[in-house]
Amino acid sequence: MSDDVRTIEWTGDGLRLLDQTVLPHRVEYLTVRDVDVLVDAIRRLVVRGAPALGVAGGFGVAIAVRQAARDGWDGARRDAAIARVREARPTAVNLAAGVDRVLPFVPAGEDAVVAEAQAILDEDVRGNHAIGAFGADWILDRVGDRPLRVLTHCNAGALATAGWGTALGVVRELHGRGRVELVYADETRPLLQGARLTAWELDRAGIPCVVQTDAAAPSTILRGFVDVAVIGADRVAANGDTANKIGSVGVALACAAAGIPLVVAAPWSTVDPSVPDGNGVPIEERPAEEVLTWSGARTAPAGARGFNPAFDVTPARLVTALVTETGVLEVSAGTTPSMRRGGSAVSSRGEGAGGGA
Ligand SMILES: CSC[C@@H](O)[C@@H](O)C(=O)COP(=O)(O)O
């Protein structure tokens, strides 16, 4: 993403968000100055993607601190507002983690909170570049040092992060090395993060891309059109089970059946060691209207009810590699995130089970 378009930044006036609900047709920003507007923006996916939500969580606390001073709130009201930000969406662990990370700075005041939230943002951008390099190295080593056909699901790009992207950071790095033949971008039902956002990012970056329906993805993989799938994550359990946008598990099953790698690209801030496996990940269920309507018009018959889980869990045995900012864990081969601070060894490149920050 070029410098003229920032997903999320603190301007002093408030938190400036690129409104992802109107992309790719319009580039509009929303400046958030109060907590209720932020909670609504998170729920409507004005800002979305696990790492970007972590940054929003950190700055959300700054908004609450400023609002408390402005509107004369007591501590209890301020803390309740912070809790609303923390709980605005349940699956991406980054949101709660972002809030929790800045909380100790609340007594020191707004500037201290903003500085810590800015550190989350800056670390995310740095980490994504490292993820891109580690991921590209691993893929070219394991899949082949040639222009590759890459499949991705949802949007794990600059828009989903503070910049550069995780899965799309790997794609950007591969492209920079002349190693992308084509990207298959799954459209990502029902809110089209792939068709609207991933395709927009790839087009701006000059990376060849086709958009396909989610239902096409397993077939595309089984027909031999894809060399590697690279996706992001909303929460990675200690055993490597990975929650990501609904539809990811179908991609993973097809990759396993076709014998191609499924690579999950995510920062350590998306790993939740407190959750032993995928059963412990809360899965957001979104309004039924998102699947019962199209462009605001009802598509399903009046009597139909909807079921709209926003995420699924890919079992660790289907995750070939987890690429973090400190290296690569070969999860299906038995190297899990829980081994990070453990002892024994790990991966092909750089990362050990005891590695990382
Ligand atoms: C780097 S973003 C990783 C994930 O958060 C992403 O793949 C995803 O599932 C986003 O879902 P969304 O509902 O758009 O917030």
Image (spheres, helix red, strand yellow):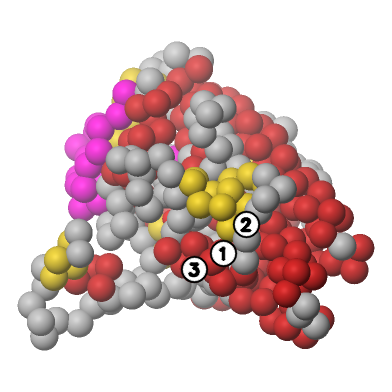
Between 257 and 61, the residue placed more toward the observer is 61
Q: CA separation, marks 1 and 2?
A: 8 Å
Q: Quadrant of residue 77?
A: bottom right
Give, as a single range, the part of the protein colored magenta: 208-230
Residue sitting nearer the eye, 289 or 114: 114
The tag earlier along the polypeptide, 1 or 2, is 1
The secondary structure type at the circle numbered 1 is helix
Please say if 150 is above or below 9: above
> Could you tell me which secondary element the residue under label 3 belongs to?
helix
Q: In the rendered structure, are the residues bearing label 3 and label 1 in contact, judged by CB atoms less than 8 Å apart?
A: yes
Chain-order first, disc 3 or disc 2: 3
Q: Can you see residue 141?
A: yes
Q: Which amino acid does the dot numbered 3 rest on?
A: Asp
Image location of residue 161, percent across then percent down: 57, 45
The answer as to whether callout 2 falls within 8 Å of ligand 1 is no
Residue 292 x %, y %: 19, 71
Residue ID at (14%, 66%)? 297
